[in-house]
Image (cartoon, grey):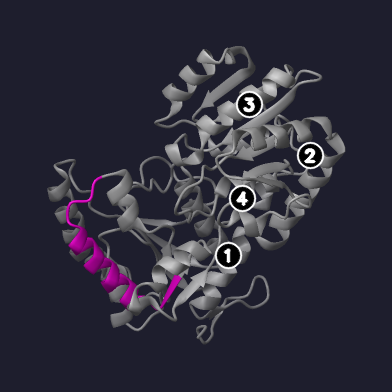
């Protein structure tokens, strides 16, 4: 039974929470546990009870930086590397160290290199650029040095999209170590005969969205497109599942357009409620705007497809590779509300198309994009080979 340290030192990733990043952490941990791994979780953010399937994960709490001015917080987060190093040393021996990349954390990958165990770094975004654009980054030079240290120390870098891979290849120390491992789903969460969590009146066509309500998710575009659809198909309704900083603006926009009665906001929901809410949708939307740098691996789209809900998404980034138009979903130009409205109306008018796309989308993700496959890829890259189910994994050479 291999012992794996999973490290998440980012305060913005509540490992037992409801955010997309939280689901990613939880599902990777569950999948590794199903592979027979013994898991040691090192995190700065583990509030609440461990979700189902993670009760046996051993938790190591890392120090949390105080809510002070940004410069002091950055310094405190970097200084916390010494405590992470001490905790990893006490937890050893380990067979693999796996870390979700955060701006200031370097100790885990450097520790793995020094004790000659594989160190895998999961990179979900170009965090330096993201922090500077959407939040506050005081010491960019230090963040870049930390990135060079941790990318250089890692045995391998696992990124969620080709766009993140291209970003990593810009660091000389990362070249030759980059692997693309996209997001995935847990099939057990999405039964084929799932029951709707909301009543669906006869004749009502439901357009749905699930996710954190943030600017880059394109919710204003969705509301604009839905207004165009509703003008032609008054029986349509809009179901928005989630919470976030854009909620008040969206409510105001819906109200101004006279769509309040046709729109339902659920607010934040538990992860276990999502499959039932997907079952209440006739079509699910990923209405991303025309972002200059789209590097996401949209978890919501994988879950839409797993739930058998036909998808309309923006033709951008990884979505162009995941969705084959007319086969397992529909794609529209990003930022084009009339095109999105037209695609939604087509879905409304063609129920057989919806069924066919929903079935094909589910088959796509369940066949190629499950968390168990992600865990197997992690162990393969890390040099831990799986044997027959129920047997202890054995060491194997890491991928070149």
Q: Earlier in the sequence, mark 2 or mark 1?
A: 2
Q: Which residue is mark 3?
A: 226
**How many angstroms separate mark 4 from mark 2 (CA)?**
29 Å
Q: Which residue lies at the image location 72% right of the left edge and 16% below the top edge?
A: 234
Q: Earlier in the sequence, mark 1 or mark 4?
A: 4
- Do the residues bearing badges 1 and 4 touch, measured as CB atoms within 8 Å? no
Q: Is residue 112 visible?
A: no
- Magenta range is 136-157
Would you say 244 lies left or right of 357 here? left
Q: Which residue is mark 2?
A: 193
Would you say 11 lies left or right of 98 here? left
* Residue 150 highlighted magenta (yes or no): yes
* Residue 312 highlighted magenta (yes or no): no
Q: Earlier in the sequence, mark 2 or mark 3?
A: 2
Q: Which residue is mark 4?
A: 315
Q: In x, y percent, where is residue 8?
A: 36, 57
Q: Residues within 10 Å of mark 4 (few under 14, many from 20)?
A: many
Q: Which residue lies at the image location 46% right of the left edge and 68% below the top edge?
A: 165
Q: Which residue is mark 1?
A: 374
Q: Residues within 10 Å of mark 3 (few under 14, many from 20)?
A: many
- Do the residues bearing badges 3 and 1 touch, measured as CB atoms within 8 Å? no
Label 1 residue SS? helix
Would you say 374 lies left or right of 250 here? right
């Amino acid at each position: 039974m291999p012992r794996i340290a999973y490290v998440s030192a980012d305060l913005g990733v509540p490992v037992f929470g409801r955010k997309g990043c939280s689901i990613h952490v939880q599902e990777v941990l569950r999948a590794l546990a199903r592979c027979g791994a013994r898991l040691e979780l090192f995190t700065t953010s583990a509030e609440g009870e461990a979700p189902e399937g993670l009760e046996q994960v051993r938790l190591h709490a890392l120090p949390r930086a105080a809510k002070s001015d940004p410069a002091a917080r950055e310094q405190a987060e970097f200084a916390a590397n010494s405590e992470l190093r001490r905790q990893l040393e006490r937890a050893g021996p380990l067979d693999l160290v796996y870390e979700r990349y955060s701006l200031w954390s370097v100790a885990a990958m450097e520790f793995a290199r020094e004790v000659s165990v594989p160190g895998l770094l999961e990179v979900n975004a170009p965090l330096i650029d993201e922090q500077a654009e959407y939040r506050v980054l005081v010491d960019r030079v230090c963040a870049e040095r930390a990135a060079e240290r941790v990318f250089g120390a890692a045995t391998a870098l696992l990124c969620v999209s080709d766009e993140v891979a291209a970003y990593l290849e810009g660091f000389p120390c990362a070249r030759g170590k980059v692997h693309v491992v996209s997001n995935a789903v847990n099939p057990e969460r999405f039964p084929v005969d799932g029951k709707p969590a909301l009543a669906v009146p006869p004749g009502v066509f439901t357009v749905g969205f699930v996710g954190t309500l943030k600017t880059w998710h394109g919710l204003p575009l969705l509301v604009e497109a839905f207004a165009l659809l509703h003008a032609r198909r008054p029986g349509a309704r809009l179901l928005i599942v989630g919470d976030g900083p854009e909620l008040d603006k969206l409510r105001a926009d819906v109200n101004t357009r006279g769509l309040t009665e046709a729109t339902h906001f659920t607010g934040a929901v538990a992860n276990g409620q999502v499959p039932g809410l997907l079952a209440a949708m006739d079509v699910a939307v990923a209405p991303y705007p025309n972002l200059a740098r789209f590097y996401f691996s949209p978890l919501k789209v994988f879950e839409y497809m797993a739930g058998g809900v036909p998808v309309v998404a923006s033709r951008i980034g990884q979505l162009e590779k995941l969705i084959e138009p007319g086969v397992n979903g529909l794609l529209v130009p990003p930022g084009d509300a009339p095109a999105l409205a037209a695609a939604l109306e087509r879905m409304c008018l063609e129920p057989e198309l919806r069924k066919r796309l929903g079935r094909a989308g589910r088959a796509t993700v369940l066949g190629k994009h499950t968390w168990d496959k992600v865990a197997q890829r992690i162990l393969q890259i890390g040099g831990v080979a799986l044997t027959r189910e129920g047997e202890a994994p054995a060491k194997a050479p890491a991928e070149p």
